[in-house]
Amino acid sequence: MNLRNVSVILAALILACTVFLPAARADEWNQKTKLTFSQPVEIPGRILPAGTYWFVLLNNQSNRNIVEIFNGNWSKLEATLITVPTDRMEPRGVTQIQFAERRHDKPEALLKWYYPGLLTGHQFLYRPRHQREFQRDAKLNELARPGSSSSEAMAG
């Protein structure tokens, strides 16, 4: 094999990598995640009815903490929310979401969302009034159910 053939093959491989690599990492960049809730779910500022939603990061190079929530068919932007980074001890291969412990008569409140395989996720920001309510509800739940643990759900 001569030098020219090796150069052509090498150039073709480099071109293939640059063409296909961004497509393979597209979901990790925007963290596009489809979540289906069987009951209403509270997010900061509103309650989402039961249904399917798409969670994605806003395409913003300088701020990776803005989450957009779209309805199941992408026809409506339900919310744009500021989050803060939150870490977990080890990455998991599935989407992980965490809810606040709530009284049974209130919708679960979404606290955290982790994209599969990443250590850093997104913590949703609630008003201090809601934070106090979540703490109060957790204490009431603890009194009602001794030995209970935090409310955590896995989504696929």
Image: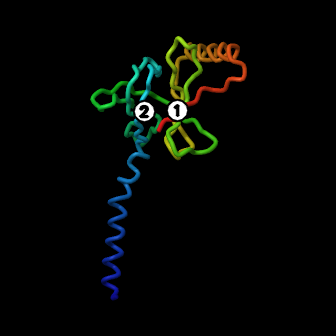
Q: How are the residues colored?
A: rainbow
Q: Give me the disc on residue 88.
A: none
Which residue is labeled 1 in the image?
97
Which residue is labeled 2 in the image?
35
In the foreground, 64 or 124: 124
In the foreground, 156 or 135: 156
What residue is rendered at 33% in x and 30% in y? 72
Question: Which is nearer the N-term, disc 1 or disc 2?
Answer: 2
Where is residue 70 drawn, in percent x and y? 35, 30
What residue is rendered at 30% in x and 77% in y? 8
Asked if 32 appears above or below 11 in the picture, the reply is: above
What residue is rendered at 44% in x and 33% in y? 66
Disc 2, SS: strand
Q: Residue furthest bottom?
A: 2
Q: Quadrant of residue 104?
A: top right
Q: What amino acid type should be assigned to the residue bearing mark 2?
A: Leu
CB of mark 1 within 8 Å of CB of mark 2? yes
Asked if 50 appears above or below 24 in the picture, the reply is: above
Quadrant of the snapshot with the N terminus: bottom left
